[in-house]
């Protein structure tokens, strides 16, 4: 089995910055969780038509999520072989994450299932609120690109979450591996598309959900490298009615948080789109959002790279060299332009997530078509920009947007113990 997921030690799960211009109450940011509903995959419904548990006491009195199992602490102990040290997958701000197996020896009649179990550290950065938010959201949401919450344990002072086991770990673990990175261009574009679909689903709910912590360590990969979003501890319901934004404490991770959100505390779905742009840029360049090991002007990836994204010659020089020969210039330019737009300083200048999905789908279909049309043995999609007949005309064609507003692993913001410490600092 591969390592389940990486745990980011510096993930922000508590208030780190209070905006000087506003006074926010400690409970102002309490998540208004989705209602209980039997939701088929991809179906869109209101997330707030019924009340959801607001605290642990409420959850114990109203435990029912039909598709989520409630486990005893004894069962969690059996599933992890008494929390054996060699079952540890990682450790971070939330606590320790263990590999687990739930079978008939744990619960009679239970089909054997590999799981990842997060145990909340009562002295850690995260608390009951983030734990409960995870239960509330993933207990109600069902989508191919969201990690599945299998169950939870809330017994005495014990707080545990049980997720599906994601065999390939986090995107972060693969993308920033110093040696042996096997993320090809097609894999990266597929991961980007999967993640975009997950965000588009959240944004498209009747009452949108803002993910608020989109980053590589929160994108988990299964055995086939299908990507799923994990860790909903910071998720927040979006504005409703005539509201244009949700005012909230600034929480997230430096390098990924949208600038207008950091400055004002005004949260919208466009904040997630900025975070998506950062991850897309990381996929293109193979660099971390923040990396102090690089020259000072390159510490902040967005500040350094965004001005280069609409310059064909310059962007080709800084694309991850590990992908050489795997992409066409035409397609690479389109993806770079998409990243440029997602990273706009003006929130309304960013495309909507459904537009992002459409473009990434078109990119994938064009590459597949190019491979089918190619003859012979190995297919090389790379076009030398000096000889491409499309170099001059197609590079000038931007992606259009109508700008309308509308953690082997399991979810955790962490990292494998074998991975280097993160460079990203938190807000």
Image (spheres, rainbow, N blue to C red):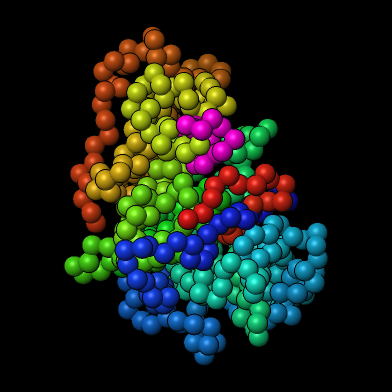
Q: Position of residue 355 (x, y in %)?
A: 30, 45
The one nearer the camera, 307 or 21, is 21
Residue at 65% across, 82% down: 157
As drawn, is 98 to the left or to the right of 186? right
**Residue range of the region highlighted in magenta in the rendering:** 282-298
Magenta stretch encompasses residue 24: no
Q: Position of residue 153 (x, y in %)?
A: 63, 78
**Does the rendering let one see residue 146?**
yes
> Measuring 50% from the left and 78% from the top, which residue is drawn there?
66
Q: Nearer the viewer, residue 384 or 319?
A: 319
Question: Can residue 285 be found in the magenta stretch?
Answer: yes
> 9 or 177, which lies in front?
9
* Residue 139 visible: no
Image x and y of residue 79, in percent:
74, 70
- The answer to whether 359 is drawn above or below residue 414 in the figure is above
Q: Is residue 365 left or right of residue 244?
A: right
The structure residue drawn at horizontal position 80% and vertical position 62%, both measured from the top left corner, is 85
Q: Would you identify the image quadrant in which residue 342 lies?
A: top left
Q: Position of residue 302 (x, y in %)?
A: 42, 38
Q: Residue furthest bottom?
A: 61
The quarter of the displayed image where residue 20 is located = bottom left
In terms of depth relative to the viewer, which is nearer, 198 or 12? 12
Query: Along the horizontal axis of the image, is 233 left or right of 91?
Result: left
Q: Residue furthest front?
A: 20
Q: Residue at x 52, y 90 (%)?
A: 61
């Amino acid at each position: 089995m591969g390592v389940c997921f990486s745990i980011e030690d510096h993930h922000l799960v508590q208030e780190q910055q209070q905006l000087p211009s506003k006074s926010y109450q400690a409970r102002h940011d309490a998540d208004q969780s989705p209602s209980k509903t039997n939701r088929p995959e991809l179906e869109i419904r209101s997330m707030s038509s019924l009340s959801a548990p607001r605290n642990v006491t409420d959850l114990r009195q109203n435990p029912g999520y039909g598709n989520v199992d409630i486990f005893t602490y004894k069962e969690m102990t059996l599933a992890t072989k008494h929390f054996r040290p060699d079952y540890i997958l990682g450790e971070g701000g939330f606590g320790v994450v263990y590999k687990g197996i739930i079978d008939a020896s744990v619960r009679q009649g239970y089909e054997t299932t590999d799981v990842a179990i997060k145990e909340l550290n009562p002295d850690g950065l995260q608390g009951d609120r983030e734990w409960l938010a995870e239960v509330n959201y993933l207990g109600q949401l069902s989508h191919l690109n969201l990690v599945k919450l299998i169950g939870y344990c809330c017994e005495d002072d014990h707080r545990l979450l049980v997720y599906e086991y994601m065999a390939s770990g986090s995107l972060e673990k693969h993308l920033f591996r110093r040696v042996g990175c096997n993320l090809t261009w097609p894999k990266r574009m597929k991961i980007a598309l999967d993640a975009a679909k997950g965000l588009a689903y959240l944004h498209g709910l009747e009452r949108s959900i803002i993910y608020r912590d989109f980053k590589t360590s929160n994108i988990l990969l299964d055995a086939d490298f299908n990507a799923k979003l994990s860790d909903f501890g910071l998720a927040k319901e979006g504005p409703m009615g005539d509201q244009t934004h949700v005012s909230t404490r600034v929480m997230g991770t430096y390098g990924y948080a949208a600038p207008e959100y950091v400055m004002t505390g005004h949260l919208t779905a466009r904040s997630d789109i900025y975070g998506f742009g950062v991850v897309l840029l990381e996929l293109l360049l193979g660099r971390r959002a923040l990396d102090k090991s690089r020259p000072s002007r390159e510490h902040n990836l967005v500040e350094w790279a965004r001005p280069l994204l609409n310059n064909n010659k310059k962007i080709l020089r800084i694309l991850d060299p590990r992908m050489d020969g795997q992409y066409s210039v035409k397609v690479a330019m389109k993806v770079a332009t998409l990243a440029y737009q997602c990273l706009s300083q003006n929130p309304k200048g960013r495309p909507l997530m459904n537009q992002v999905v459409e473009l990434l789908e078109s990119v994938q279909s064009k590459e597949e078509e190019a491979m089918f049309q190619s003859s012979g043995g190995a297919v090389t999609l790379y076009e030398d920009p000096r000889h491409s007949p499309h170099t001059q005309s197609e590079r000038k064609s931007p992606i259009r947007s109508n700008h309308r507003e509308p953690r082997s692993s399991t979810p955790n913001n962490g990292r494998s113990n074998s991975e280097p410490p993160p460079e990203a600092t938190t807000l």
